[in-house]
Image: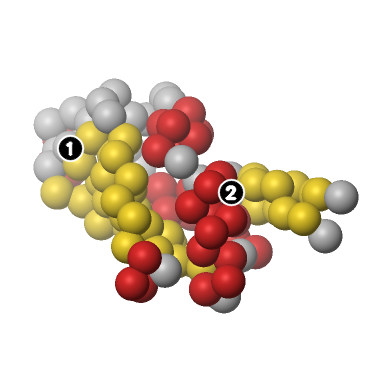
Amino acid sequence: MSRKVKLFELAHARAGDKGTITNICLFPYDEKIYPLLEQQVTAEKVKELFSELVAGEVIRYDIPSLKGFNFVLQGTRSGGVSSALAIDAHGKSLSYGLLELEIDVED
């Protein structure tokens, strides 16, 4: 039997940005969860989650040696930080947004 679990229960994330690109790194609290995240937290799902904020491509880079992932979100703010009209111009809250994603976990 499976249940829906939000990522914040399983992992932590950090975000950074440069110009119109935001990076979000995702790391599980327990490395045993890595295969589950690898399977379910895809670039397509992240693109869908941020569909209203990301104008460009989302690329996922797997980092198996660190049991983590780096998501590169292209086109997150027009003109970069200095031109952004968003309240959080730096996009740091996008890491918290990613942690709201729900995945299926077997009991």
How much space separates mark 1 and mark 2, taking CA atoms? 23 Å
Q: In terms of image quadrants, where is residue 101?
A: top right
On the picture, is 50 further left or further right than 90? right
Which residue is more in the foreground, 90 or 43? 43
- Counting other residues with Cα less than 10 Å from the Cα at mark 1, is it few (<14), some (14-19), or many (20 or more)? many
Q: Say whether marks 1 and 2 touch (CB < 8 Å).
A: no
Residue at 21 percent of width and 51 percent of height: 17
- Counting other residues with Cα less than 10 Å from the Cα at mark 2, is it few (<14), some (14-19), or many (20 or more)? some
The residue under label 1 is: 20
Q: Is residue 76 visible?
A: no
Helix, strand or loop at label 2? It is: loop
Q: Position of residue 104 (x, y in %)?
A: 70, 47
Q: Position of residue 78 (x, y in %)?
A: 19, 28
On the picture, is 57 further left or further right than 96? left
**Amino acid type at image mark 2:** Glu
Residue at 33 percent of width and 30 percent of height: 54
On the picture, is 46 further left or further right than 25? right
Label total for image:
2
Residue at 65 percent of width and 47 percent of height: 103
Q: Where, quadrant-wise, is the C terminus in this rendering?
A: bottom right
The residue under label 2 is: 100
Counting residues from the N terminus, which is met first, the one under dot 1 or under dot 2?
1
Q: Position of residue 31 (x, y in %)?
A: 52, 73
Which residue is more in the foreground, 36 or 14? 36
**Amino acid type at image mark 1:** Thr
Q: Position of residue 51 (x, y in %)?
A: 43, 26
Residue at 49 percent of width and 52 percent of height: 38
